[in-house]
Image (cartoon, helix red, strand yellow):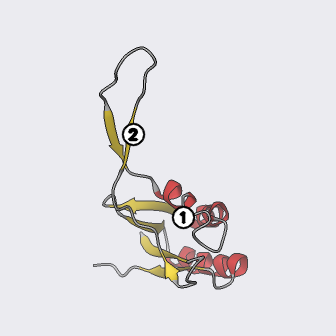
């Protein structure tokens, strides 16, 4: 298993950025005829987190998800860190080439060394 960090270009500052989960989303309910005192916390999965970047980065996050899914998958580790998981190093190299072709220098991946 190969893991990589996904880097976008910030729409405002044009420097490399990656989203992280600072705090899980709190979801509750509102009822018409009663009070509901139930709340749950839920983190985003990898695709949801990337899709939330629309407008904050210089590319369409939906297209990034499409490219990543050709070679691997997006995942959130430890309810915080966004990574790309791939089966082989060859897939990682193909993903980098696909990023370059689709987005130029606006999106790239950095391999995370195994510990």
Q: Circle 2: is it few (<14), some (14-19), or many (20+) Cα within 10 Å? A: few
Up/down of 40 relative to 96, above or below: above
Q: Circle 1: is it few (<14), some (14-19), or many (20+) Cα within 10 Å? A: some
Residue ranking furthest to the top: 33
State the residue at coordinates (45%, 75%). Answer: 5
**Circle 1 sits on which residue?**
72
The Cα–Cα distance between marks 2 and 1, rounded to whole angstroms, is 29 Å
Q: Choose the circle earlier in sequence order: 2 or 1.
A: 2
Instruction: Please give left or right for residue 48 compared with residue 106 in the image.
Output: left
Instruction: Please give left or right for residue 40 compared with residue 94 in the image.
Output: left
Q: Position of residue 58 (x, y in %)?
A: 64, 74
Which element type, helix, strand or loop, lies under badge 2?
strand
Q: Quadrant of the N terminus?
A: bottom left
Up/down of 37 relative to 52, above or below: above
User: From the viewer's perspective, is the residue at label 2 or at label 1 nearer?
Assistant: 2
Which element type, helix, strand or loop, lies under badge 1?
strand
Q: Position of residue 55 (x, y in %)?
A: 62, 65
Up/down of 107 relative to 84, above or below: below
**Circle 2 sits on which residue?**
27
Q: Nearer the viewer, residue 77 or 60?
A: 60
């Amino acid at each position: 298993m190969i893991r990589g960090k996904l880097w976008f270009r910030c729409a405002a500052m044009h420097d490399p950025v990656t989203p992280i989960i600072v705090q899980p989303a709190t979801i509750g309910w509102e009822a018409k005829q009663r009070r509901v005192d139930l709340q749950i916390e839920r983190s985003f999965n990898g695709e949801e987190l990337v899709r939330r970047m629309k407008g904050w980065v210089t590319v369409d996050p939906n297209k990034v998800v499409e490219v990543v899914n050709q070679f691997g998958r997006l995942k959130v580790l430890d309810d915080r860190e966004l990574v790309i998981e791939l089966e082989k190093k060859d897939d990682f190299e193909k993903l980098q080439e696909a990023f370059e072709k689709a987005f130029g220098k606006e999106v790239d991946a950095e391999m995370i060394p195994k510990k």
